[in-house]
Image (cartoon, helix red, strand yellow):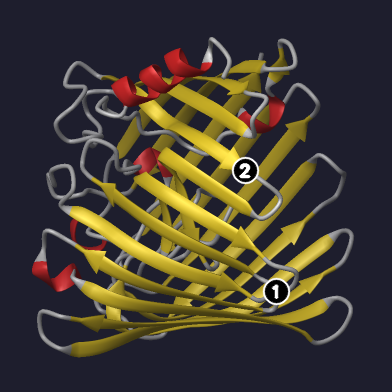
C-alpha cells in the first residue's frame, strides 16, 4: 500500500461530516490534468446569472470555484476528493437551509474510495446515484455502491442517505430528485443526517433495466417501495421507443401510485427529437438539469405532453428547444412552457457557455426565466 493511501482515506473520513456545496452541472471531471501516473487535479471557474421576470424582475449571481484531485494506487484502488466553494446571494433560497448564512456555500461535492476489477466495483463515500433515465432518482448521497458485471448484463446494489446539508437542492442548479424534495420543492425539509435514505437493487439487461428501491423518509408519505422499469426498443436505425414505468407503493396509506414517461427518440448526426408524454396519478416533482440540458417538469404535473428538439449545427455546439403542455391543470393559470437553450463547448481545456431561457405561458401573465452560465477549466 502506497504511503499516500492512508492519508487519503483519513481525508475522506474527515470530510464525510463536512457540509456539501450546492453545485450546478460541471465539466471538470472529464478534463483533469495528469500530474503523474498516480495524481490528477483540476480547477473549474464558473459564474451563473439568473434573471426572473413576472410582476417584478429579479437578478441573481452565483460565482463558484470547483476543484478536484484524484489518486490511483497500484492495487485497483482509487480516491476522489471534489470540493466546491460558491457564493449564494442573501436574497436567494438558502442552500442548504442551515448553512452559509453569510452567503458562502462550501463543502464536498464528491468524495469516495473506489475499488474496481474486471467484474466488480465497490464505491464508498459521497457519490452520485442515478436510476433509469434519471427523472426519478438523480441524486448525490453518502453511501456504498456495489456493481457486478456479467457478459450480458450488470447488477448493482446501492445503500445511501441524504440530508439537508448534502442535498443538491437550490433553484440555480435546476436539479431535483424524488425523495422529500417533492414535498418541499427543492428543499429537504430540514432533514437530519440519516432521516432520508434508500436501498436500491438494479439490473441492466441492455434494452431493459429494472430497479427495486425501498425509500425511508422522515415524512411518512415518502416511505415507499418503488419499482423502476426502463425499456429501450430500437424501431429503425435512427428511431427508438423509450418508456419508463415507475409504480410506487406508499406505506402510510397502502396505496399504489405510478409515473409513466414514454417518448419516440429520433437521432441523426445533426438532429435529435423527442416526442412523448408523462402520465402520473399523483403530483410529482421530477428531475431536471437546467435549460438546454434536459427537459424539466414542475411539482404539480400529472399529465404532460412534450416536444424536445436538439440541433447540432457544429460539433461543439448544442441548441435545444423544449416545449411541454399540461393536459391536466392543477392550477387554473397553468398552461404550457417553452424552453430554449444553447451550449457551446470547446475542448480539450473545456470552456462552456450555457444560455437558457424559459417562458411559462400562463393564462394571466407570462413568467420569464433566463440563465447564462460560463464555465472554464484551468
Q: Residues within 10 Å of mark 1 (few under 14, many from 20)?
A: few
Residue labelled with disc 2: 116
Q: Residue 140: which quarter of the image?
A: top left
The residue closer to the viewer here, 71 or 96, is 71
Question: Element type at marker 2?
Answer: strand
Q: Is residue 120 above or below residue 94?
A: below
User: For the residues carrying marks 1 and 2, which lies nearer the camera in this image?
Assistant: 2
The answer to whether residue 106 is visible is no
Instruction: Give 213 or 318, whichever is nearer the viewer.
Output: 213
Image spot of residue 333 (x, y percent): 29, 72
Residue 328 vertical placement versus 72 (above, below) = below
180 sits left or right of 124 in the view: left
Residue 177 occupies quadrant: bottom left
Compared across the picture, whether 357 is left or right of 186 comes to right
Is 147 displayed left or right of 248 in the figure? right
Q: Are marks 1 and 2 in contact (CB under 8 Å)?
A: no
Precedes in sequence: disc 1 or disc 2: 2
Q: How many marks?
A: 2
How far across and how far down the image is residue 352, in percent?
Answer: 67, 30
Q: Quadrant of the C terminus?
A: top right
Distance between mark 1 and mark 2 Cα atoms: 21 Å
The residue wearing badge 1 is: 206
**Residue drawn at (59%, 26%) of the image:** 374
Q: Please give the label number shown on residue 257.
A: none
Q: Residue at x 63, y 23 (%)?
A: 73
Which structural element holds mark 1? loop
Image quarter in which the N terminus is found: top right
Q: Is residue 144 above or below residue 25?
A: below
Q: Residue at x 74, y 34 (%)?
A: 345
Q: Residue furthest front?
A: 1
Viewer-proximal residue among 55 and 155: 155
Amino acid at each position: 500500500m502506497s504511503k499516500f493511501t492512508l492519508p487519503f482515506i483519513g481525508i475522506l473520513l474527515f470530510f464525510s461530516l463536512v457540509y456539501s456545496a450546492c453545485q450546478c452541472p460541471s465539466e471538470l471531471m472529464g478534463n483533469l490534468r495528469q500530474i503523474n501516473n498516480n495524481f490528477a487535479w483540476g480547477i473549474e471557474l464558473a459564474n451563473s446569472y439568473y434573471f426572473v421576470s413576472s410582476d417584478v424582475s429579479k437578478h441573481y449571481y452565483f460565482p463558484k470555484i470547483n476543484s478536484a484531485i484524484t489518486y490511483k494506487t497500484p492495487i485497483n484502488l482509487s480516491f476522489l476528493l471534489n470540493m466546491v466553494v460558491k457564493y449564494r446571494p442573501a436574497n436567494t433560497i438558502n442552500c442548504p437551509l442551515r448553512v452559509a448564512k453569510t452567503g458562502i456555500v462550501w463543502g464536498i461535492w464528491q468524495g469516495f474510495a473506489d475499488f474496481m476489477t474486471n467484474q466488480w466495483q465497490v464505491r464508498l463515500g459521497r457519490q452520485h446515484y442515478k436510476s433509469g433515465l434519471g427523472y426519478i432518482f438523480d441524486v448525490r448521497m453518502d453511501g456504498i455502491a456495489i456493481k457486478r458485471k456479467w457478459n450480458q448484463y450488470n447488477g448493482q446494489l446501492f445503500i445511501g442517505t441524504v440530508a439537508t446539508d448534502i442535498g443538491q437542492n437550490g433553484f440555480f442548479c435546476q436539479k431535483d430528485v424524488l425523495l422529500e424534495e417533492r414535498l418541499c420543492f427543492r428543499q429537504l425539509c430540514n432533514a437530519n443526517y440519516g432521516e432520508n435514505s434508500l436501498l436500491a437493487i438494479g439490473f441492466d439487461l441492455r434494452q431493459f433495466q429494472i430497479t427495486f428501491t425501498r425509500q425511508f423518509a422522515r415524512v411518512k408519505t415518502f416511505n415507499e417501495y418503488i419499482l423502476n422499469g426502463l425499456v429501450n426498443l430500437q424501431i429503425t436505425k435512427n428511431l427508438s421507443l423509450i418508456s419508463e414505468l415507475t409504480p410506487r407503493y406508499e406505506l402510510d396509506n397502502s396505496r399504489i401510485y405510478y409515473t409513466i414517461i414514454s417518448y419516440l427518440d429520433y437521432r441523426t448526426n445533426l438532429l435529435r427529437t423527442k416526442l412523448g408524454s408523462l402520465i402520473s396519478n399523483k403530483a410529482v416533482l421530477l428531475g431536471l438539469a437546467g435549460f438546454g440540458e434536459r427537459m424539466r417538469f414542475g411539482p404539480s404535473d400529472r399529465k404532460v405532453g412534450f416536444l424536445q428538439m436538439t440541433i447540432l449545427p457544429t460539433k461543439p455546439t448544442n441548441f435545444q428547444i423544449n416545449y411541454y403542455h399540461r393536459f391536466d391543470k392543477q392550477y387554473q393559470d397553468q398552461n404550457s412552457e417553452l424552453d430554449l437553450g444553447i451550449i457551446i463547448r470547446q475542448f480539450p481545456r473545456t470552456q462552456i457557455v450555457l444560455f437558457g431561457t424559459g417562458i411559462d405561458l400562463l393564462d394571466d401573465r407570462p413568467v420569464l426565466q433566463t440563465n447564462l452560465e460560463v464555465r472554464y477549466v484551468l
